[in-house]
Image (tube, rainbow, N blue to C red):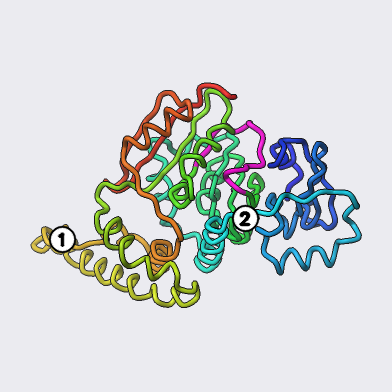
Amino acid sequence: MKKRLLAFLCCPSCGGSLRHDEFSSDRRTRETIDGMLVCSRCRKWYPIIAGIPRMLPFNMIRKDMLSAYMEKYSSHIPKGLREEAPEAARLKAKTSKSFGFQWNAFSEIFPEFEQNFLDYISPLDRPFFRGKLVLDAGCGFGRHTYFAAKYGAEVIGFDLSDAVEAAYRNCRGLKKVHIVQGDIYKPPFRKRFDFIMSIGVLHHLPDPEKGFLRLAELSRTGKPVFAWVYGREGRWFKVYVVEGFIRQLTKRTPHRALYYMCYIPASVYQLSNALYRFCEKRPALRPLGRFFPFKGYAKFPFRVKHADAFDLLATPVNNYYRRADMEKWAKDAGLSGVRITQLGGKSWRLLGIKRHNG
């Protein structure tokens, strides 16, 4: 954890300021590796483990990691401090476990992800990020955090799951990146952000609109908020077949077994893409290309197809939205200058400006 991060953090329980105690550090980068954050108001405390502040109830932190930390540093922790109340939400824990497995198994950042990121955030572009403080809510393994920082932003990548471990590894060489483990419903941040983005995350939450509203509250007045979510339009197969039948089995399948099972759909994507590219290179066959499914994956390596197959089949919840839903989100969040656009006819991009802070 970079000490500068402390200026942006607050207690997720009461909003109080935090005291930083360091137990071990990286001499080269001067970052805190292990330590703790203590709220000056409510006296709750949060561990810093392996360079990442864990702003969660202890029962939401990986047990083996927390046990090793407590065994090593129990004598450093003052008596009388309070812990965050235990989290009882079963669905939230299942979602965290699913994405923790997924993004540590599929943690590579491929060059193709850069254009993918720019497609997601359009009409914004590279120069937009220069000099801004950005929150990447639901950062996963850090692919969007990485590119936003590359374009000149100071970025806080934020996720509930153990995917933060992969995000920390992928972004550790970037001086203006911070990684935090925490809950979108109880974000541990002050209202200082110039831009908040959530890409491919909110539709997996138990209450997606509530998550979006909590994020919008963190934006500074007059600053943009962005979300990308699944659309219902153009997704009849996923909405009615995958959700209605296939996922009823696969979301109950152990993650390791499903990882290997997903080689099958990924191979179908790969074969379809190979046939599509074959037709595209031959003018006489080019009209046939439009009949092949999964064309959007043609530019990506096999590992991305494997990861997306797992993402589709493993996550406990997938929600799909219409344009009217996005309009309601924007209105409820108090956004102005709202732009709602489609990406590929199958998803929605919502961009708006925060009018005021409550």
Q: Secondary structure at mark 1?
A: helix
Give the residue number, with chain letter if any, for mark 2: 88
Q: Could you say which quadrant of the image residue 242 lies in?
A: bottom left
Give the residue number, with chain letter if any, for mark 1: 291
Cα distance between the residues tagged 1 and 2: 47 Å
Closest to the observer, 251 or 46: 251
Q: Residue at x 64, y 44 (%)?
A: 176
| Mark 1 or 2, closer to the camera | 2
Seen as rendered, the residue at the extreme front is 88
Amino acid identity at mark 2:
Ala
Q: Could you say which quadrant of the image residue 43 lies in?
A: top right
Disc 2: CA contacts within 10 A as few (<14), some (14-19) or many (>=20):
few
Q: Residue at x 81, y 63 (%)?
A: 70
Q: Residue at x 80, y 39 (%)?
A: 42
Q: Could you say which quadrant of the image residue 336 lies in?
A: top left
User: Residue 326, percent across and down?
Assistant: 37, 36
User: Residue 299, percent across and down?
Assistant: 33, 60
Count of numbered circles in the view: 2
Which secondary structure class fits the magenta region best?
loop
Q: Residue at x 53, y 49 (%)?
A: 138
Q: In the picture shown, does residue 195 fall above or below 89? A: above
Specify the segment rendered in magenta. 183-197
The quarter of the image holding the C terminus is top right
Amino acid identity at mark 1:
Phe
User: Residue 61, percent across and down?
Assistant: 68, 60
Residue 131 seen in render? no
User: Residue 67, percent across and down?
Assistant: 76, 67
Q: In the picture shown, does residue 346 fall above or below 105? A: above
Q: Secondary structure at mark 2?
A: loop
